[in-house]
Amino acid sequence: MREPVVGRRIFLRGLGAVSVGLPLLDAFTPRHARAADLPRCAVFIRQANGVAQAGNNEPERFWPKNLGALTQAGLQAETDRTLIELAGYASKLLVVRGTRFAFPGNGCGHSGGGNQVLTAAQVSTDPKGQYSLAMGESVDNRMASAINPNKLEPLTLLTGATEGYLPVVLSYRGAKQLRGADNDPFTVYKRMTGLAGMDQAVVDQVATRRKSVNDLVRAQLQGLLANKRLSSEDRRRLELHTSAIRDVEVKLSCTLPEMRQRELDGINPVDGKNYEAVTQMHMELVALSFACDYSRVATLQMGAGNDGTQFAIPGFRNGALLPRFHQISHRIFSDGAEGDPIEGAQEMHHEIDKLHARLFRYLLDKLNAYTQPNGTLLDNSVAVWTNDLGHGVSHNYVNIPWVIAGSGGGYLKQGQYIDAGNVTHNQLLNTLLNAVGVRKSDGSPVDDFGDPSLKKGQISGMLA
Amino acid sequence: VGSQVETLTASSAYPRLSHRQWALAAQDLLQLATTPDFSGFANDAPAATGFDNTGGQLEVSQALWEDYQSASEALAAKVAGDSALLAKITPAGLPASGDARAQAFVTSLGERAFRRPLTADETTAFVALFKQGATLLPGRDALSAGAELTIQALLQAPGFIYRQELGSTPDKEVSALSDYEVAARLSFMLWDSLPDAPLMAAAKAGQLHLAAQVAEQAKRMLALPRAADKLVEFHRQLLELRRYDTLHPQGLPDGIGAALRAETERFVKAVVVDDRGGFADLLSKSYSFVNKDIAGLYGLGGSYGSDLVRADLNPEERAGLLTQPGFLIYRSGDTAPILRGVFINLKLLCADLPPPPVFTPPKMSGVTRREKVSSITGPGTCGEGCHARVINPAGYPLEYFDNQGRYRTQDSGKAVDGSAAYAFSEGTQSYDGPVEWAHVIAQSKQAHECYARHWLEFGYGRAYASGDAPLVQRVAAASLSDNRSVQELLTLLVQSPSFLSHKSEAP
């Protein structure tokens, strides 16, 4: 395992709170930092309902036309494909087709896909259906425990409401240990910044008081844990609680401009009409977190699939409100039917894919705006756009969309579209773990993430 | 059925408070006029019960720990920095200074926070912290400083955050709960908050372990406003009422979503609290609460303002929760019969639906919504197994309502067909239209059992297990055959062996 390198946070402490809403600020990078010392970061954003790729008698609207090198001019010329929206980032993309989820869902395709996408683990039998869980740790959790400073948990974000048919599915501490996701950007922001901006003398006083309180609370938790009859599940929960208590304030030393803070504060995060705005706010927080070395790992679940989300896309059908996205993704209802029951459903799905491509581009813009000695924050990170399904119509688990940007500081190939050859996607997760510097305990590359029954190894075509 | 006794279900010895419980308990502990804002507390992972208080699954993550920390600090500073507020929580006859004062303050507040007397070790630890006040909060009055630190720590302490349930014989797998543990179970079940003084006094006197003693307390507690809040909160979570806030139905005023939610909450309160009604009443009463935006959806004449007022509805068109516009609008559109049908199956009938098929209605013109849905999921289609028998028949009678919840008799120029038959676990029942359907559900054993099961999960704060079946059947029978009120069902639930004892999970 690589030792986390803490640089910018310590460096920043002397500056107090600094507003970094705009493209950055070389001053934030320690002048002595060498490229190899820079932290690696990873963010996974997950769209739901599959993409409008070829299948079920529908034409290809997602993947690029040709395997091999991706260029800006090439992507721009592919006017019927989703990735046209990312043409400006062609040289920093790694697009991977040919991976699949290994295990069946258990009564709910969305939940089963969401359970597997970042875990490569089996889907639980109890609970089942829309409440099914992953039977293993997720990749963001593994990354955070290896590379996050101060043992921070990964940022776990959600666009949309937490109540409804399909809940949160993405991040797991371990088998069935689903992590809650935060859907209110301002809440997350406040937690990330804490006492930033306060007078140092006040901060020190608060910290001393906290230490006394923490000591008392920890001692009482230790008392409970001393009980030999404690159930294993209670023990796990109380240990988690104990480890959550920290004496050192772990906070961002940089802040967003006040105007943007007010926008975060003012938005209703569960109103479907704010889907894009809230997603963008979450992305800004992820970029801020990486740039100022808070959590180096984040996930963002955008919507829940079957959650009633409806999009209205400017310039498409006069900006009319489209049917529910989930219904668009289900456009064929019986075998052998000709044409689409929702007229133009694949086109709608394609437009929704492009909307998500633009959201991904927004994230890349934010990451790419921070310069570092050997490039940008994006270059030293891995930003991943994926899905809980492959094809929207059949809700299947093959050809999962993986659009990756940033090379993890040179680990991943760039400007390429590759076919992994219908392998299980644990190999892709292995590759990404290595890209951000995670290693096995003996120092060798990770090759065994996910369910132990899966074929080990990385996807060699992804390596630079 | 009545003579069968449930087998005990193992459960956590440290269920965590829900966010709502933490905030209400903090409010009561500190005797604040308003409930602390807990909307920013880190979201918990969803539980399969669908409720937010399945305590054995709730964790304290780093994020939540930080939220507890900041909320505790803010509340402690507020109370300790205001002499009037501080006086409220200071025990009478507090010694003027020194260790005795610290001891008295800590003992009194600690017992309320932990819902039991502090142990000697706990007292020592909190007294030591109290006395650090002078150095950690320099320049402050010693009582105020000590109180601030004590409150800050109490609100973060495991004794406050978890409902400890070790039983009176902790070394046994099954143990009767201690009187104090019963008090806390009772107060968090009925109030989402701490025991009050009479309940603590009963526990202290050892008068809180027999079913009759507990029932008597429950009846007293159910008459207080906190219980009304809890009764409404149950239905708010069961029916996903918070989602109504962000509904934007086409053609209706912006902001109507919040009014639709308020309507259903007022209705639930009127039926369950004010009229002490039962589950059947929730599905059959033909009145509701309307304002100027909602009245039109019911076809009501007359003038209404922004506030909700009680209105009698046409009993041939409307019957309870299932015919309210909020419910109908939240589940509307071309697939409304399916959305409404699935909800009724899952949440009102606890039907175990197989995996949903791939489905979307085709664009057809000149046919009714029912005809469209039937053509895809009715007899002879791939969706038949589940849709034709249980989903569609639960949704079709509500076809008398359009996407705005208005009553209609025509769909696409044809007469609405609201007739159907549902395969209940106790047998198939036929009906025609929403009112008949609502009354059929209101008289269904399956529905009453489902309602009782939800209350067991929400009341006990844990998932239902097969061993609970006899208890659920007993409560459901009281609800259906004896017409017992919802409040009486809760009184039954708190008298069961499951409530009064604890079975440990495996180490």
Image (spheres, coloured by chain):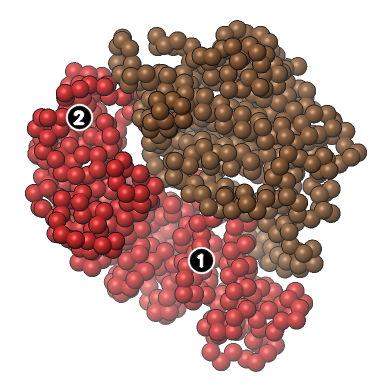
**Mark seen at residue A137:** none
Quadrant of the image containing the C terminus of chain A: top right
* Chain letter of the residue carrying label 1: B
Q: Position of residue A250 (x, y in %)?
A: 72, 52
The color chain A is rendered in: brown
Q: Residue at x 70, y 50 (%)?
A: A255
Same-chain status of marks 1 and 2: yes
- Residue B59 located left or right of residue B487: right
Q: Is residue A36 above or below residue B319?
A: above
Please give the residue where the numbered disc 1 appears in the rendered image. Answer: B36
Q: Secondary structure at mark 1?
A: loop
Neighbour tally class for label 2: few under 14, some 14-19, many 20 plus, Cα within 10 Å: many
Q: Residue at x 67, y 18 (%)?
A: A90
User: Would you say residue B1 is visible in this rendering?
Assistant: no
The chain coloured red carries which letter?
B
Q: Is residue A249 above or below residue B126?
A: above
Name the kind of residue labelled 2 in the image: Arg
Q: Position of residue B3 (x, y in %)?
A: 21, 55
- Lower sequence index among marks 1 and 2: 1
**Mark seen at residue B369:** 2
Q: Secondary structure at mark 2?
A: helix
Specify the quadrant of the image occupied by residue B134: bottom right
Disc 1 from disc 2: Cα separation: 47 Å
Q: Residue at x 75, y 54 (%)?
A: A17
